[in-house]
Amino acid sequence: MIRVAFASNDRRTVNLHFGGAESLVIYDIAPGQADLVGVGTFMKAEQIGETGRVGLTGTVHDKVLPKLDFVEGCAAVYAASIGTSSIRRLMAQGVQPIIVDNGHDILDLLNEVSLALVHGGLSWVERAKAKADAAAVANRLQENPADRETHRLLTSVDELE
């Protein structure tokens, strides 16, 4: 299972710019199934002054930080557009930025990811799946350390004597 975010204000289509998005939705996707696990709403971002940076309304704060926090743990984020700074920041935290046409149907994208989990074809899905599988193994090992047993095994037939 992998987690994917979508920049959407209607929960049906990808229709927002990532940095300016007032809403993001997150799904957990497994082969044949997608579960909505989170909806984040954010303050409206707007230009501050004539030459100021775009920030949160009434502040000078970075508009992208809350969104980066919200998508932490996601394998990818789909948006109608993503600025280069946000692309670098998403990739630095291990989230694949994906730009799709404005109005792209989220259900179609969920099906695409589900099929890629089973049959491959999307390299970012394969990387995310491998990462999720490795994390699941590590979690299982940490959950029951008392249940783990270590055995010294033979490495050559000479040890049989």
Image (spheres, rainbow, N blue to C red):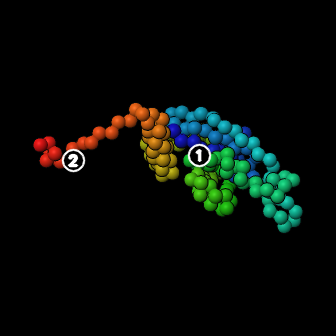
**How far across and how far down the image is residue 114, in percent?**
51, 39
Q: Quadrant of the C terminus?
A: top left
Give the image location of residue 105, x and y in percent: 63, 42
Horizontal side of 3 relative to 39 (left or right) equals left
- Residue depicted at 83% across the width and 64% down the height: 52
Amino acid type, mark 2: Thr
Q: Is residue 12 visible?
A: no
Name, please, the residue furthest toward the left. Answer: 161
Residue 108 locus on image (x, y percent): 58, 41
Instruction: State the residue at coordinates (45%, 34%).
Output: 144
Kind of residue at badge 1: Gly
Residue at image mark 1: 73
Is 99 situated left or right of 122 in this image?
Answer: right
Q: In which quarter of the image is residue 89?
A: bottom right
Query: Is residue 150 at least partly visible in the picture?
Result: yes
Q: What element carries label 2?
A: loop
Residue corresponding to mark 2? 155
Residue beneath the point at 70% across and 38% down: 39
